[in-house]
Image (cartoon, grey):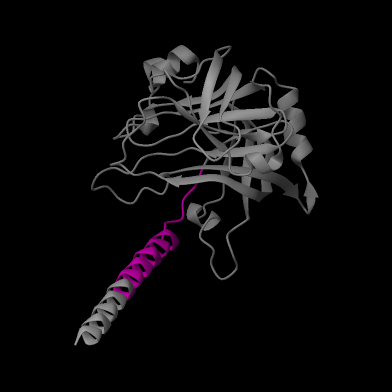
Amino acid sequence: MKNLKSALLSISAMVFILAISLASGSIFKDKINTLQKEPVATHNMLVVGEKAIFFSHLPMFQEKDGPLMPHRFQAILQVGFKKQGSSTDAVYMKDRQSHPGTKIYTINPEPFVLTKLISPGSQGAMRQFKGNIFRGHFEKENVEILSNVDIHVNRVIYFQEFDRTAKRSTQLQYLLFGKGKELFLAHLITAPPDFDQVVSVTVAGHSFSDEELVKGIKLTIPGTINSPATRLKEKQKVAEARNADTTSMLKKLEFVVNREFYFEEGELKVPAKFGATPEEKKSGFQ
């Protein structure tokens, strides 16, 4: 009887584990299906970098009871440009170097499904699309420097869907990305109201390998307040930024902020506000 009872308990446990596994598989499958059903949209992005080229998707939050927002993702990509099979990276890089006073470069791409960058279909994850590259913000004063260029996605550094119910950190958090000594910080966007910011930095006492930067490094800056007014500013020195990856040998960083390439807060409110906010005007982003 005791053996029978043990056998029955074992069978029950196996059935329970199988049910949980099937449920988890179903949830995962549902998530993949949701991502694959994302609408086609025009995903405009910030362009930074002179040694390597990076895109930062210009996001917005999902509104409660509103239609599905295709821009509810923060995404950072490393890319290359081609035209008729030949690299045109140098066209962008030379233009950027010859216009040091211009902070913002943007891409206005052809419509596509953003999540195809991470959700592989039968042909694998999408790694190419077309777009126009602008010196300046494509919606404001600008000069088109590359037209209908092929964008090749070398790697997806960061891709995160927003959760409206997520709790925002009380301290500033950024993602460090770049190549070699050309390094950037992107403010990690969590929940509304929030803000988007990309700055360049010089890190003291450490040279980064490509492997270290392949997925970016999440940093928390102790003693700060996570708000647009108290964000990182140009020429600001940060004595300690802590690595969120506790398994990394690199526990903390010291850096200086060089330049603020982008700042946006109005479009990361719910509902989004498209006019320049006082903080955006104060910072010259309007």
In the picture provided, is 181 more to the left or to the right than 242? Answer: right
Closer to the camera in the image, 254 or 162: 254
Residue 23 in the magenta stretch? The answer is yes
Q: Is residue 258 visible?
A: no
Image location of residue 119, percent across then percent down: 51, 60
Q: Is residue 233 visible?
A: yes
In the picture provided, is 181 more to the left or to the right than 278? Answer: right
Stretch of the chain drawn in magenta? 18-43
Q: Residue furthest left?
A: 1
Image location of residue 183, percent across then percent down: 65, 29
In the picture provided, is 223 more to the left or to the right than 238? Answer: left
Q: Overall secondary structure of the magenta stretch?
A: helix
What residue lies at 29% left-to-right and 35% top-to-bottom? 271
Image location of residue 22, percent across then percent down: 34, 73
What residue lies at 54% left-to-right and 16% top-to-bottom? 238
Q: Where, quadrant-wise, is the N terminus in this rendering?
A: bottom left
Closer to the camera in the image, 215 or 63: 215
In the picture provided, is 190 more to the left or to the right than 159? Answer: left
What residue lies at 77% left-to-right and 42% top-to-bottom? 88
Residue 90 sits in quarter: top right
Residue 147 sits in quarter: top right
